[in-house]
Image (tube, rainbow, N blue to C red):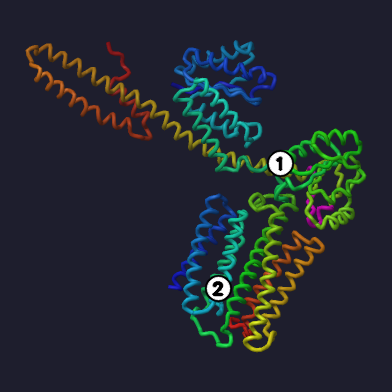
């Protein structure tokens, strides 16, 4: 049996192809059941996310199954096969193992270290388990994949450090404050990035939300969305006295908050720390206020700087992860090889038994007058001889050695196990 | 026996210190755990050595320099363990254990013979005064260690290049709060230590105050921490300023503790 992976991802296919090939909801079960009945296919798992569609298979003939699966995809989704060729990739055996390990540990993701993919793989595997489309090979492969991804997550820092501006802001907030749920936060102005950051802060459980906007209506709209309270834009400086986190994106052409004003605010708030994120370009807040004790001001460039460093950091960790994968592939290969030795042991035993039977028959034909006792003795001796002869090769096959592949091949050749006998 | 337990404690603290310093460069949950196992074991051995010495001397073992530094370290480790298990602050050990080790090492190098205490000093004031003083000092030591952590973390956040220890150091708020809490614990202890010292002096020599330079420094220390508390409660001075003041306060304590010894004039027996 071989492992075969056929699929496409954000690197090989545009979104319009990806969405056509997606196996969603009802389609997933139907596809899974039909793939299982394809010739040469023994086991199947389908992973379908917005960035990738992959089919994991255990097959008896990789080339034939590859053809069959491509035909199936083209037929199932009603897409011309020629249109698929450029997008689909295929991996077999060790390359397939490496690929699925890398996918699950998010090394193959758009953002290295993103956490969703592992959950998606788990779900895909669980679904196939439920539908009984997996067997010994894929069960082992998927379980190993999940454990490798977990190992990489704990042993490397691949998922640490934010790689988007909004997450970087949330991460900083958590290094300034202990418990965001006791902190209040003000959205000053609006804008996509500001709202996104606000949303991330909300999902980290920030407490009170204040909205200050030049146009009252848009302020109210945002307040509804964030379940916050609208404050007058002209009052915002005064409101900072009771606010711990400020996200600013007003679109003003000059500073709306100066150092002297902030000095007063800090006195009034008894120097309690305040974290100000100025997302606007040009900046809306006097950068000098970062010099005031307990005021932490970050602008877009500062956040970009952090994100860039974090990306590099993740790249370094990704290299460590590749090392872990190489290690794990080795242990998986050992397991695969051990699967192979079982049929050889059985074949060897069968061969010996066949020879024994044949020769005993010949002997008994020649000596028809042998009594029951003598016949038993002859059979006993024959058994003893073959057992003694096949014991060492059997033991060697069962042993966990590095060059078991070679050993299996040698034994099969020496005992003629692959020859057809008539 | 006492020596054996003391040396073992020193060895365990030493190993814990090495691990805690290594932790600054290579982090993992297991290193923290191993470090804590060494600290706890060292602490148990240390406790035994102090109890044995108490039994042997028949008085609070905080009289000569060896005993005093040893008891000071013991109080610091006690507070460290309480904080560690209560708050699980990342890297706290890396900032406290080196100090503990230096204290223990100086204790190890000082003469260990048990000398009889002059009769006028033998009273229950000895235990009261030393326990108050050293617990207070230990709280200030912890506050200073946490103050250093605060300043480093504050530097990372302010400089806008959070890297290195940024991820593993605790957040600024909790560091500031614990720093403050430790000072609110240390300050009344120091106050009571000074008062009990004065009462002890009164009962021993018939006067509350003496010209002991150490007492002058104790009062300076007391003033520094009074300023920390005062500015914080009244003007909301916190964070960096509080951290710096708590470090200055602790340096004063160390000067009072070791520096004055060079003058060799003090009434304090061990100075």
Which residue in the protein does label 1 denote? A204
Which one is in front in this view, the residue at disc 2 or the one at disc 1?
Answer: 1
Label disc, if present, on residue A172 of the rendered structure: none
| Front position in the image: B61 or A105 | B61
Is any part of residue B264 visible from this angle? Answer: yes
Crowding around mark 2 (Cα neighbors within 10 Å: few <14, some 14 to 19, many 20+) is some
Q: Quadrant of residue A1?
A: top left
In the image, what residue occupies the spot 22% across and 18% down? A355
Q: Position of residue A215 (x, y in %)?
A: 91, 36
Indicate whether residue A296 is drawn in magenta.
yes
- Judge whether A167 appears above or below A335 on screen: below
Distance between mark 2 and mark 1 Cα atoms: 48 Å
**Residue that label 2 marks:** B106
At which x and y percent is residue A258? Answer: 89, 51
**What is the magenta range?**
A288-300
Secondary structure beneath label 1: loop
Q: Residues within 10 Å of mark 1 (few under 14, many from 20)?
A: some
Residue A283 in the image, given as x and y percentages of width and height: 85, 44
Would residue A50 appear left or right of B231 to someone viewing this image? Answer: left
Report whether A302 appears left or right of A87: right
Instruction: Please identify the quarter of the rendering in which residue A100 is found.
Output: top right
């Amino acid at each position: 049996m071989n492992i075969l992976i056929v699929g496409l991802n954000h690197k090989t296919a545009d979104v319009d192809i990806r969405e056509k090939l997606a196996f969603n909801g009802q389609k997933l079960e139907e596809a899974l059941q039909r793939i299982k009945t394809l010739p040469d296919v023994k086991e199947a798992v389908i992973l379908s996310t917005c960035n990738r569609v992959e089919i994991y298979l255990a097959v008896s003939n990789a080339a034939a199954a590859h053809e069959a699966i491509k035909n199936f995809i083209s037929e199932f989704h009603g897409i011309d096969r020629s249109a698929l060729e450029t997008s689909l990739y295929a991996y077999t055996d060790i390359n397939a193992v490496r690929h699925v390990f890398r996918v699950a540990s998010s090394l193959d993701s758009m953002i290295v270290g993103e956490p969703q993919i592992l959950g998606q793989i788990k779900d895909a595997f669980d679904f196939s388990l439920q539908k009984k489309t997996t067997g010994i090979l894929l069960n082992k492969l998927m379980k190993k994949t999940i454990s490798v991804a977990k190992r990489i997550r704990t042993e490397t820092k691949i998922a640490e450090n934010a790689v988007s501006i909004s997450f970087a802001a949330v991460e900083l907030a958590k290094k300034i404050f202990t418990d965001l749920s006791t902190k209040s936060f003000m959205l000053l102005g609006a804008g996509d990035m500001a709202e996104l950051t606000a949303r991330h802060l909300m999902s980290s459980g920030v407490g009170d939300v204040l909205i200050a906007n030049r146009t009252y209506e848009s302020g109210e709209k945002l307040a509804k969305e964030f379940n916050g309270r609208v404050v007058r834009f002209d009052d915002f400086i005064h409101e900072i006295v009771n606010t711990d986190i400020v996200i600013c994106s007003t679109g003003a052409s000059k500073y709306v908050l100066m150092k002297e004003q902030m000095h007063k605010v800090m006195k009034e708030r008894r120097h309690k720390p305040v974290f100000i994120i100025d997302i606007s370009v040009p900046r809306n807040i006097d950068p000098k206020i970062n010099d005031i004790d307990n005021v932490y001001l970050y602008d877009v460039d500062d956040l970009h700087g952090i994100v860039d460093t974090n990306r590099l950091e993740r790249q370094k960790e990704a290299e460590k992860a590749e090392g872990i994968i190489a290690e794990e592939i080795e242990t998986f290969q050992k397991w695969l090889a051990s699967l192979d030795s079982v049929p050889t042991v059985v074949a060897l035993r069968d061969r010996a038994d066949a020879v024994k039977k044949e020769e005993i028959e010949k002997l008994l034909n020649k000596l028809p007058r042998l009594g029951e006792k003598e016949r038993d003795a002859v059979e006993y001796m024959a058994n003893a001889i073959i057992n003694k002869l096949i014991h060492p090769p059997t033991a060697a096959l069962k042993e966990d050695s590095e060059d078991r592949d070679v050993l299996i091949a040698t034994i099969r050749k020496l005992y003629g196990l692959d020859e057809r006998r008539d | 026996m006492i020596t054996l337990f003391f040396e073992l404690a020193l060895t365990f603290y030493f190993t814990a210190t090495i691990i805690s310093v290594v932790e600054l460069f290579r982090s993992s949950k297991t290193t923290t755990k191993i470090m804590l196992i060494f600290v706890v074991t060292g602490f148990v051995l240390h406790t035994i050595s102090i109890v044995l010495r108490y039994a042997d001397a028949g008085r609070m073992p905080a009289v000569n320099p060896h005993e005093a530094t040893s008891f000071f370290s013991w109080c610091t480790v006690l507070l460290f363990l309480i904080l560690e298990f209560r708050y699980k602050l990342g890297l706290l050990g890396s900032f406290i254990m080196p100090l503990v080790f230096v204290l223990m090492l100086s204790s190890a190098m000082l003469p260990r013979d048990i000398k009889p205490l002059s009769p006028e000093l033998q009273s229950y004031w000895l235990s009261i005064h030393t326990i108050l003083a050293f617990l207070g000092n230990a709280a200030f030591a912890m506050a200073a260690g946490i103050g250093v952590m605060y300043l480093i973390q504050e530097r990372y956040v302010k400089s806008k290049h959070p890297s290195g220890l940024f991820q593993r150091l605790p957040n600024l708020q909790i560091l500031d709060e614990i720093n403050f809490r430790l000072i609110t614990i240390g300050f009344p202890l120091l106050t009571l230590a000074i008062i009990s010292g004065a009462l002890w002096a009164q009962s021993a020599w018939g006067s509350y105050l003496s010209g002991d330079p150490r007492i002058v420094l104790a009062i300076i220390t007391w003033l520094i921490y009074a300023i920390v508390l005062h500015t914080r409660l009244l003007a909301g001075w916190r964070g960096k300023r509080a951290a710096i003041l708590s470090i200055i306060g602790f340096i004063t304590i160390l000067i009072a503790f070791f520096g004055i010894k060079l003058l060799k004039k003090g009434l304090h027996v061990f100075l």
